[in-house]
Amino acid sequence: MKKSTGIILILLMMIPAGYFAARKYSYSAMYESLEFPEIENTVIEYMTGIADPMDFVPETDLDITVKDNQKIDTSAAGEHEITYIAAGTDIFSQTAVREFKKTFTVKDTKGPEITLAEDHIRSAVNSIPDLSRYVTCSDPADGELPYSETLTEGTWTYEKIDLSKAGEHKLMIRAMDRSGNTASRPLYIDAAGDPESVSFYIRVNRAANTVTVYDRNEDGTAGDPLKVMVCSTGDATPLGSYPTFAKYEWRALFGGVFGQYATAITGNILFHSVPYFSMNKGDLEYLEYNKLGTAASMGCVRLSVTDAKWIYENCVLGTTVEFYDDEDNPGPLGKPVPIEIDVSSSSRGWDPTDPDPANPWKNKKG
C-alpha cells in the first residue's frame, strides 16, 4: 500500500460514522423546513397593467425566483396561480430547492370617478338643467359611464330634488361600475328667484374695495346709484356678473371662522361680515375689521355688519352682482371712510355697526 493511500484511509476513519447520514438527513430536513414567506396582499387591482409576482414577496433569507418568469395580466379578472422556486442552504452548505404555488386574485375594487365641470350651477326654479354638460363619470376598468334614469351597473344618475324654491339645493350624483363599486358626489344647484322681484343691482369694485348698490332698470342693467359700502376683497374675488343664490344668518368660512348675514354670489364667494372666531357676536376678529377698505379676504366680500345685514334683508335672491376693477374711480358715490376699532377697548370683540341691543358700542361701554 502506498503511503498516500494509507493517509487517506486514516483520515476517512477519523470522520464520524454518522457524518454522511447526517448530511443526507440535513438535506432532507432542510427541504422540509423551507417555508415560503407570508404574502400579505394577494388581491391585485383590475386593469393596472402587467404585475410582477416578485413585487409581492417580502424580504427573506431564501433565494426566491418565479418559475418560467410568470407574470400576472391584470386585464384578466379572477385567480392567477404563480409557482415560486425557493432555495435554502443548510449548515453543511447543502442547497435545498422547493416549489411553492401561490394564488393571486385580480379584482376590480375601485369605484367610478365623478368629475364636475363646476361645483355650483344655476337654474331657474322648477328646472333642472342638462347635467350631462357638467357631469362626467368614468371608471378605470369600464371607461366612461352613460347616464341612466335609475342606477344600474355601468351607469350614473342623480337624485331627484325639489327645486320649487329659490336658493341653494344639494343634488347627489351617483355612479356604479360594472363590478358593483359605487361613488357619489354632491352638485349644488342655485335656483334663482323670480327676476320680476329683483329691484337692485350691485357693483363691486375690487380695486377700490367698494360696493355700490343701484336701482335695477327694466332691462336688468344698473340704474341710479343708491348706496355705497366699504369692503374688503381678495386675490380670489372673481370678475364678471352673477345672480345671488342663497342666504345664511351665520355661515362657516374657510379657516374655521364664521360670518354674519352671508349672501352667496357664486361658488364659495359671498357677501358677509368681517369674520368671527365663533358664532358669537362678541367674538369678532377686530384686527381684520380694521382692514376694511383694503384687500384682505380670501375671495369673499367682507362688509361691516350693518352693510352685510342690509344686503341680506333687502336684496332678493337673483340680484345681479357685478365685479369689476377701477382703481382711480371707486364709484359714483365715492368711498366711505371705514370705522376703526380701538383694539385696547373691552368692546373690541363687537362690530360697532351691529344693531344688536347687546352691542356695548351702542351702550357706550367702550
Image (cartoon, rainbow, N blue to C red):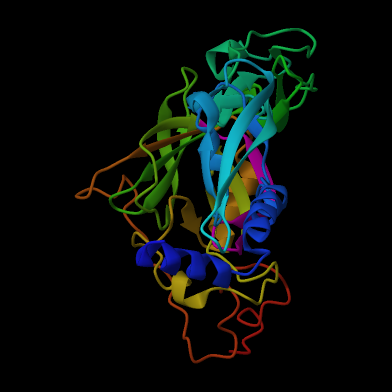
Residue displayed at 48% across by 26% down: 69
Q: Residue at x 22, y 50 (%)?
A: 327
Depth check, front residue: 139 or 137: 139
Q: Foreground: 242 or 92?
A: 92
Q: Position of residue 160 (x, y in %)?
A: 79, 18
Stretch of the chain drawn in magenta: 243-258
Q: Is residue 164 left or right of residue 7?
A: right
Asked if the stretch drawn in magenta spans residue 152, the answer is no
Q: Quadrant of the N terminus?
A: bottom left
Q: State whether residue 294 is above or below residue 219.
A: below
Left or right side of 346 for 108: right
Residue 251 falls left or right of residue 199:
right
Q: Is residue 272 left or right of residue 21?
A: left
Q: Quadrant of the C terminus?
A: bottom right
Residue furthest front in the image = 1
Q: From the top left corner, tell me how far across and down residue 133 is, in percent.
A: 53, 13
The residue under the point 39% across, 69% down is 291
Q: Nearer the viewer, residue 206 or 222?
A: 206
Q: Is residue 211 above or below residue 238?
A: below
